[in-house]
Amino acid sequence: MLAAPICCRLTFGADLSPGSWPDGERVALEESELDAYAGPKATRVVDGSEGLVAGTMSPIAVRVGLDVLRQGGTAADAAAAMALTQATTSLGSFVSHAGILQLVYFDATSGRVHSLDAGWASYLGENEPKTIPSPASPDGDQGRKTLVPGFMAGIGALHERFGALPFKELFAPAIWYAENGVTISRGLAEAFRQRQKELSRTEGGRQFLRQAGNRLPVAGGRFVQRELAQTLRAVAHDGARHMYSGPWGRHYVEAVRREGGKATIEDMERYEPLWEEPLGTTFAGHVVFGPGRSSEGGYQALEALNLIEALQIDRLPPYWQDAASFQRLARVLNVTDLPPNWMMDRARTKGVTLVLADRASKEFAAALAPIVGDFFVPPKKSGRTAPKSDHTAGVVVIDRHGNAAAMVHSINTVNWGSTGIVVDGIPVADAAAINRDALAARPPGGRMPDLMVPMIVTRDDRPVLAVAITGGVQRETVRIILGLIANKVDAPTLMMAPPLVTVNGARKSELVLPVGAGAHEAGFLTRLQALGSTVQVVTPEEARHLRGVGVIGRIDAATGQRSSVEVPGLFAFAAGY
């Protein structure tokens, strides 16, 4: 079914305000949001004959997305409204209206997949990125820790190209919760406690902290973001450029420069999100599309899928059932997770003459496959430290027209960042401090590549799967696509399967596998060790933190039925109609 013609899209509005929801339903959603880290109460498959939405951390945002679809919005509208709401209900802690986003979108009208990069951009005047204060440093010019955010420009670009509802309507849920308040969860209260020193450093930060009526927000308090509501109203009225060439952009530059940063209004005005051709590859009779060439994460995931086919890992049993499959898959994911320039230098010593631009190709995988076991980078400290989770949110939407959106957005740092800068109700992250090495490798004013990997899988030129991962990024993305597409495992079994997390050990060829206590039967771990892997048993909570969380949306090729899955312990929620 084709999407509605553009000429018919902007002639109606919608009532998306949570104030119109039944009181009992809104209360139940807010209670669920308070305990979002525990995830859904039971495992269930969520179906929708016409529309489906799935998102991390915020059942409120999932309800918003479903409302948008029911009231005539496209997958683009629903994804935008959900992301705006996620940033509001999280209080800008791990996702932000001044963060970044990455999107892959299937447009049913054209039958094409599109990629949108709304990542960080650096300042033209920042010439010494190596001297930017570290994230933990309370000294130095805190404004130098910042970058130009892309999130709102991305939301505007997405709506302009694929939206149907009026732009301003998409902000209604976020504005409602900013004005009426969000109840502070135990997790957010602890995050406030940990960030009190940084936020208290500036007057804007102190005002931000006081929005629950106390000097320090506590669990159960109601956090009302009136200044944020004013900013969102202005963006809804003026468009996304309000945060670049408009008042927010000017206030941002003033605040950053007061703190020693190099931002200028030119940096803000020149920012543009990038529409790109998505990278893609075939896999198990399907075509997998990821972000375009500006994203490092897309290369990693597609390279891994190609290596899996080249090494015939896709023909083995699922990794949690077969130790050899687990080990081989772990080695592939370790190689594709290496710094790209280091990996290429090592590959050249083994006779691989292809270049970085070829990494998503079958030819590159064929050349690399015989030497996968030769790659090794010892960790800086110990082989017992696994990668930490990222700070992101995922969104998947499939609408009744067959449009599909997979979006990941992030603040790219620990809650709120360490700058203490707050501009018109929006805390400003320390993204430059996190990315100093990458900044040093690029000219001033350049774009920052990111590791976010939303993906859409098609068959016969129609979408069958959309995936948006937070945390484990390429490992979890590859695990899900391999399991659903090649292994043909049912979604609940796959989402509840043990995590696939690996790190290199302290000795050459040692592969450390952090596995959750009780996740595997003892014989499986013994077989892994017999193959030469070192097994590091971690708590189930640590394992959950390390694995990341994925939201998925599927379309049955035969019936058109949309589906997703909710699993206890994973903070991913879904709804359909």
Image (cartoon, helix red, strand yellow):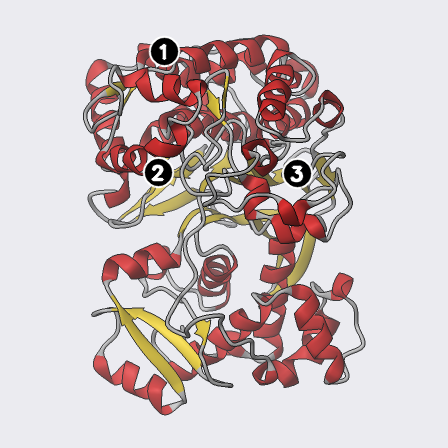
Residue 149 in which image quadrant: top right
Residue holding disc 2: 57
Q: Is residue 273 left or right of residue 14?
A: right
Residue holding disc 1: 179
Q: Residues within 10 Å of mark 1 (few under 14, many from 20)?
A: some
User: Which x, y percent locates residue 50?
Assistant: 45, 32
User: Which x, y percent locates residue 334?
Assistant: 52, 71
Q: Using the numbered discs, state the Cα–Cα distance from disc 1 to disc 2 in whole angstroms.
A: 20 Å
Q: Nearer the viewer, mark 1 or mark 2?
A: 1
Question: Residue 456: which disc?
Answer: none
The residue positioned 36% from the left and 11% from the top of the image is 179
Q: Is residue 324 left or right of residue 568?
A: right
Q: Are marks 3 and 2 in contact (CB under 8 Å)?
A: no
Q: Secondary structure at mark 3?
A: strand
Q: Is residue 17 above or below residue 412?
A: above
Residue 348 in which image quadrant: bottom right
Q: Secondary structure at mark 2?
A: loop
Q: Earlier in the sequence, mark 3 or mark 2?
A: 2
Kind of residue sitting beneath label 3: Leu
Q: Nearer the viewer, mark 1 or mark 3?
A: 1
Q: Is residue 359 left or right of residue 184?
A: right
Residue holding disc 3: 116
Identify the residue at the far front of this view: 139
Q: Using the numbered discs, state the Cα–Cα distance from disc 1 to disc 3 in whole angstroms.
A: 30 Å
Q: Earlier in the sequence, mark 1 or mark 3?
A: 3
The residue positioned 25% from the left and 50% from the top of the image is 569
Kind of residue sitting beneath label 1: Glu
